[in-house]
Amino acid sequence: MMSSDDNTLFWVGMITIPLLWLYYHPTVAAADPTTVKFNEIANNAFAKAGSIINASLEEPLLQRLSSEIIGSKRGNLAALADWEWVAGNIRYTAEPYGEDVYQPPIATVANGAGDCEDTAMLVVTLGKIAGLSVKLVIARYIMVVELQGKAGMHMYAVVEGFPCDPQYKFGEHPYPGSRTHYAEVVI
C-alpha cells in the first residue's frame, strides 16, 4: 500500500516526466522565437569567426604548423592529425558565463589555451590552409539551467566530414541524443 507521500510523488512523476519529455523533444517551427534567435546568434558568430579565420590564412606560423601537422594527408587521416594536434596542445579554458571573446588562431597557439570558438577556429584554419573541406558548427544545447532562462552554445569544427572537437573523441558529435539545434557554415 502506498502512503500519501508516495502517492503524491507518483502523481508528480506521472505529470512531470511527460512534460519534460515534451520540453526536450519539441517540434520546432521556423517561427519559434527561440530558433529565430539562435539562427541570428549563429549567423553573427559565423560572420565573426569567418572573418578571423580568413584574416589568419596568410599567417606564416599557422601555414608552417598546418604543413607540419597535416602535410599531404587527406580524408580522415588529415582530420585526425588536425584534431590530435589541437586536442594535445591547446588547453580548454572556459570564459565566464555571458562573456564571449574570439581570439585569433595565432593567439590560441601562443597562449596554448582557448575556449570552444578559439579551438574550432584553429582547427578550421589549419585545415583550410591545407586545402581540406572545413566547416564550423554551432550547437545550441538545452541544459537544466535553461529552465532559468539560460541555454548553452558550443562551436566546433568539421574537417573532411569528421567532427573535430578537442573536447570530445575524434569523430564524435557533441551532445548526441540531447535536445540540440545545429547550425553550420562552410568556411
Image: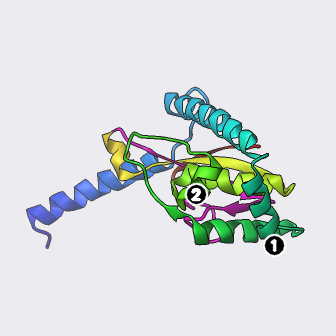
Q: Mark 2 to mark 1: distance in Å?
A: 25 Å
| Residue 162 lies in the magenta-colored region | yes
Tell me residue 43's x, y (percent).
64, 32
Question: Which residue position holds label 2?
Answer: 110
Outermost residue toward the left in this view: 4
Q: Residue at x 35, y 55 (%)?
A: 17
* Residue at the front extreme of this rendering: 60
Circle 2: residue type:
Ala
Closest to the observer, 127 or 106: 106
Mark 2 or 1: the one toward you: 2
Between 83 and 108, the one lying in front of the other is 108
Locate residue 156, reporting x and y percent.
62, 54
SS for dot 1: helix
x and y percentages locating residue 61 in the rendered image: 73, 56
Does the magenta run of residues contain 32?
no
Q: For residue 77, which numbered disc appears in the image?
A: 1
Q: Quadrant of the N terminus?
A: bottom left
| In the foreground, 81 or 109 | 109
In this rendering, the answer to whether 139 lies above or below 92 is above
**Residue 155 shows in this picture:** no
Residue found 75% across the figure and 63% down from its top: 65
Q: Quadrant of residue 79?
A: bottom right
> Magenta residues?
149-177
The C terminus lies in which quarter of the figure? top right
User: Where is residue 172, by image quadrant?
Assistant: bottom right
Residue 44 in view of the camera: yes
Quadrant for residue 14, please give it: bottom left
Q: Is residue 146 left or right of residue 167?
A: left
Residue in the picture at 35% in, 38% down = 149
Label 1 is placed on what type of residue?
A: Leu
